Amino acid sequence: MSRIWAGIGRGTSHHHGLALDTEDKSLLSRWVANDEPELLKLTGDVVDLADGRPMTWAIGGTSPRALVGHPLGERLELDTTRGA
């Protein structure tokens, strides 16, 4: 089962979400407003794309604590490398 690599590049008013498979094929690329419902939809859409495959998330420009308490938090494996 191939892993999904997902990330959110955090900006001031908008964030860029990206999901890739292990072959570097883009599965999702979307800009969303800095708005909780939009971010929840983005992360939910990535989980739907993963369809049970393991996921690793990288969060750029913020602390991974941004996803603590997220409804999908128990399923999100975070890459906490700074500068991502």
Image: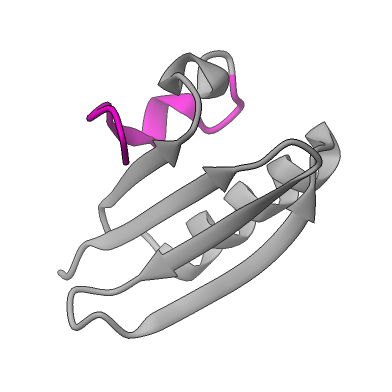
Asked whether 30 or 42 is in front, the reply is 30
What coloring was used for the rendering?
one colour
| Rendering coords of residue 3 (x, y %) | 21, 62
Q: Quadrant of the N terminus?
A: bottom left
Residue 67 is left or right of residue 14, and the answer is left
Q: Inspect the magenta stretch and tell me whether residue 80 lies in it.
A: yes
Q: Is residue 21 above or below residue 60?
A: below
The correct choice, above or below, for 45 with respect to 8 in the image is below
Q: Is residue 66 above or below residue 77?
A: above
Q: Give percent across and percent down for residue 56.
A: 28, 46
User: Which range of residues does the magenta coloring cover?
Assistant: 70-84
**Drawn side of residue 77 relative to residue 48, left or right:** left
Please tell me whether the stretch drawn in magenta is mainly helix, strand or loop.
loop
What's the residue at 56%, 20% (across, down)? Answer: 66
Quadrant in the picture for residue 29: bottom right
Counting labels gives 0
Q: Position of residue 2 (x, y in %)?
A: 17, 70
Q: Which residue is at 49% across, 64% downward?
A: 18
Q: Is residue 15 magenta?
A: no
**Residue 73 rendering spot, x and y as whole percentages:** 47, 26
Residue 77 to residue 22: above or below = above
The quadrant the C terminus occupies is: top left
In this view, the residue in front, 17 or 69, is 17
Q: Quadrant of residue 24?
A: bottom left
- Left or right of 8 in this view: 23: left
Picture residue at 73% right of the left edge, 51% below the top:
41
Residue 17, picture quadrant: bottom right
